[in-house]
Image (cartoon, rainbow, N blue to C red):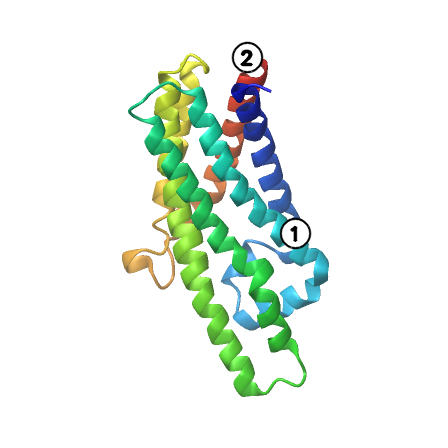
Amino acid sequence: MTVEAAAGSLLIFLPLAFNGFFLLLGRRFDYPDILRRPTEEILSRFEAGGVGLKLVWYGFMLTAVMFAPLAVLLGQVFDDPAIVPTAIVVGVLAAVVQFLGLARWPFLVPALARTYTDPASTPATREVTKAVFDSFHRYLGIGIGECLGYLLTGTWSVLTGVAMLQSSAFEAWLGWPGIIIGLFLVVGSLEFVGRFEEQGWKLAGTIVPLAYIAWSLWLVVAGLMLVFG
């Protein structure tokens, strides 16, 4: 298999897998709306989801891991020495921070949910459990996974779009959607920054889901161009 075919296959498979797990989480866990609900509801519903929900979260986490080889392989398709090395580094960092943000769900939250819903747990234990969840939720979820994840993914998309404008492997027009979508993701990374830290910036919260749908379509089209172009 050539580098172009491998990169194209990942470009197609990754957004399909990402959106597949996203839809499963929406059906089984009311994700992402559940993230803004009270902690006691999140932990109780997580525990009620059983092993199946944990496995879905594990699969969703792996889609973040897969973004690293995608960034590296796609970088080999381009021949722009000024942009490509930076794009690869940013893409790998985007994969790392999104993995760190999502890894709490299959590995940390199960223990917290069991403790919180255990009939033998005291009110004090439940309060401590809620405090631990809230701390990791804001630090790993909002700070690392969402803020840095959106920022780095958006930056990678902009850099990749610019590289597409100069690449013979893609039609030049395909670079512009990547640049525009990437800029929207960068704006979305500001949802809980500055004066929006407490309640969140509603405009950014609205932009991100739409931007990720467009981002997924952009990746699939790029993959089809590489595989069949």
Image check: 202 left or right of 12?
A: left
Image check: 202 left or right of 41?
A: left
Q: Amino acid at mark 1?
A: Val
Q: Could you classify mark 1 by the number of other residues whose Cα lies within 10 Å: few (under 14), some (14-19), or many (20 or more)?
A: some
Image check: 47 left or right of 212?
A: right
Instruction: Name the secondary structure under disc 1.
Output: helix
Image check: 62 left or right of 197?
A: right
Residue at 36% of width from left, 64% of height from top? 198
- The answer to whether residue 70 shows anywhere in this view is yes
Q: Which mark is residue 56?
A: 1
Q: Which quarter of the rendering shows the C terminus?
A: top right
Along the line of sight, the residue nearer the viewer: 56 or 93: 93
Q: Which quarter of the rendering shows the N terminus?
A: top right
The residue pinned by badge 2 equals 229
Label 2 close to label 1 by CB (< 8 Å): no
Q: Amino acid at mark 2?
A: Gly
Q: Quadrant of residue 16?
A: top right
Instruction: Name the secondary structure under disc 2.
Output: loop
Mark 2–mark 1 distance (CA, rounded to whole Å):
34 Å
- The answer to whether residue 184 shows anywhere in this view is no
Along the line of sight, the residue nearer the viewer: 29 or 67: 67
Residue at 33% of width from left, 33% of height from top? 86
Say above or below: 224 vs 209.
Answer: above
Residue at 61% of width from left, 56% of height from top? 30
Location of residue 140 in the rendering, given as x and y in whole percent from the top left corner: 44, 59
Location of residue 18 in the rendering, given as x and y in whole percent from the top left corner: 58, 41
Say above or below: 79 vs 84.
Answer: above
